Amino acid sequence: MMRLSVRRPGALALMAALALVLRGTTARAQDTTMVRISGQYNAGIKPGVLVLPVNGANGDSVRAILQRDLDYSDRINVILTEATPMDTASDGSRGQFNFPLYARLGAMLVVHATTTGTGLHVAVHSVREQKVERVRDFALTAAPLSPDWRAQVHAISDAVELWATGERGIAATRILYTSGGRVYQIDSDGANPTPITEGGRGVALYPSWHPRATHIAYVVMTDDGTRVVIREMGGAGNASRTLRASAGSVNTSPAFSPDGETLLYAHGLDNGTDLYATQAFGTDSPRRVTVSRGMDAVSPTFSPDGRRIVYVTNRPGGLGLYIADADGTNAEALTPFSFGDQSQRTDPSWAPDGRLVAFQAEKDGQTQIHTVSIRERSIRQYTSGSRNEDPSWSPDSRHLVFTSNRTGSWQLWVMDVETNRFRQLTRAAGGAKGGAWSPRLVVH
């Protein structure tokens, strides 16, 4: 995300930020209950889930997406049956279910889905009870195999995960990133990388989302400084506006408040930057939040309730994280600092559950992903080797998307912070940086 240089040899430290909001979509359903299947699972246990072959048009694609989504949730043990072909006495195609076989395979739940003329009929069976636990009809209204159709299937995966674990999944989300000077979006499973901003209109960097996924904010580098842009997603012409700024100024790292009404960003000239708050969709003059007195305050992130912020400052002499009330008062160091400490702690991202702030720490030429606990102020390191930067939380507060050069080029990776499982998200020819995870999208 934002890289801040403490020394300014007469030039502006051009740092940029981008926020992208995707148009959402809502899975239509006819079942009303969305509660966890009770009495079968203990906390911390990953239930085994078997997704039976899906009958009907595009059934193989539906099954593959459901299996991949549930696997990527890291809360479910997906039982794959390719090595043990299912016959018609056990695949549900004739309404027959071989529950003893499913139990031997390690399944606790069986998902039986069938495509219909209007969507997908999904029944979830308890293997132990040998009965149907949940039934729901989902609409699939988009063109088959299109990005919107895939988003609708992702939403079905999230509903199944909610039934199985009590936690809604994050498959129906997207992630913003920058590549080749443009902002892109990509599905949470790495499919459908799509450019959002036009090429040839200035370099766009560092995305950030509106909490309702209706707009994005990002920074464009120009010949006269950097400018913050707010862009509508999914509206007529995707209207955008650029925040007014003085000539030659730095304007960077925009972040929407949780209610979506305020935009916080860094503004300044050669003598330092401070955080300013402005109405995201109003015309009032920006209000100064921090007073850095020639130093820098950049890269803000809001607490989930909007009452506090964490940001980067070089106030201690190196780059560190400070926490303050949302109006800038009661500021104090969040990460420890000792005289002579050369580590740089930057790019904070506050988890949606409020417990942790993720950040990158640079030391001895390497950057690694860490978290700091808001309550205990304890720090944990998650990555090692290569360079790992720009963390951004998923809506479930369990996964982080981050930038890494571990494969030789800069790409986005996803990490489960509970198991330290990693998967590569992007494979962009020009590299990818500055990932920003969307809120859960409303799919329709």
Image (cartoon, grey):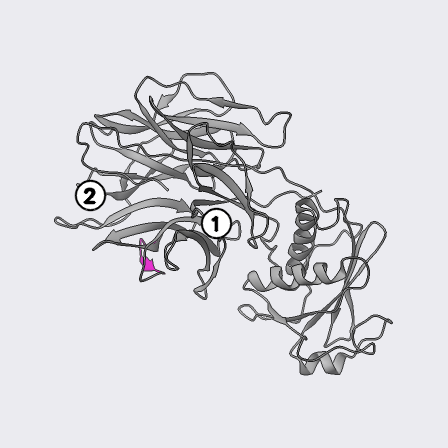
Q: Residue furthest left?
A: 340
Which amino acid type is marked by label 2?
Gly
Along the viewing direction, whichever of 49 and 152 lies nearer the viewer: 152
x then y, percent, for residue 132: 79, 67
Specify start and end residues of the magenta stretch as a single range.
Answer: 375-382
Instruction: Choose mark 2 or mark 1, whichever is in front.
Output: 1
x then y, percent, for residue 405: 36, 55
Residue topped by disc 1: 428
Q: Is residue 373 visible?
A: no
- Bin the neighbour count of mark 2 within 10 Å (Cα to Cα): few under 14, some 14-19, many 20 and up: many
Magenta span contains residue 114: no
Q: Residue 108: name its quadrant.
A: bottom right
Which amino acid type is marked by label 1?
Ala
In the image, taking residue 196 as reference, residue 106 lies left or right, namely: right
x then y, percent, for residue 171: 60, 53
Q: In which quadrant of the rendered image does the C terminus lie? A: top right
How much space separates mark 2 and mark 1, taking CA atoms?
Answer: 33 Å
Q: Residue 294: name its quadrant.
A: top left
- Label drawn at residue 318: 2
Q: Is residue 156 above or below residue 77?
A: above
Task: Find numbered disc 2 in the image and state the secondary structure of the residue it sits on.
Answer: loop
Of the image marks 2 and 1, the number of the one nearer the N terminus: 2
Task: Find numbered disc 1 in the image and state the secondary structure of the residue it sits on.
Answer: loop
Magenta span contains residue 378: yes
Number of labels in the image equals 2
In the image, taking residue 350 as reference, residue 5 lies left or right, namely: left
Q: Is residue 170 visible?
A: yes
In the image, taking residue 229 as reference, residue 74 lies left or right, namely: right
Q: In which quadrant of the rendered image does the N terminus lie? A: top left
At horizontal 53% and vertical 37% (from top left) the residue drawn is 211
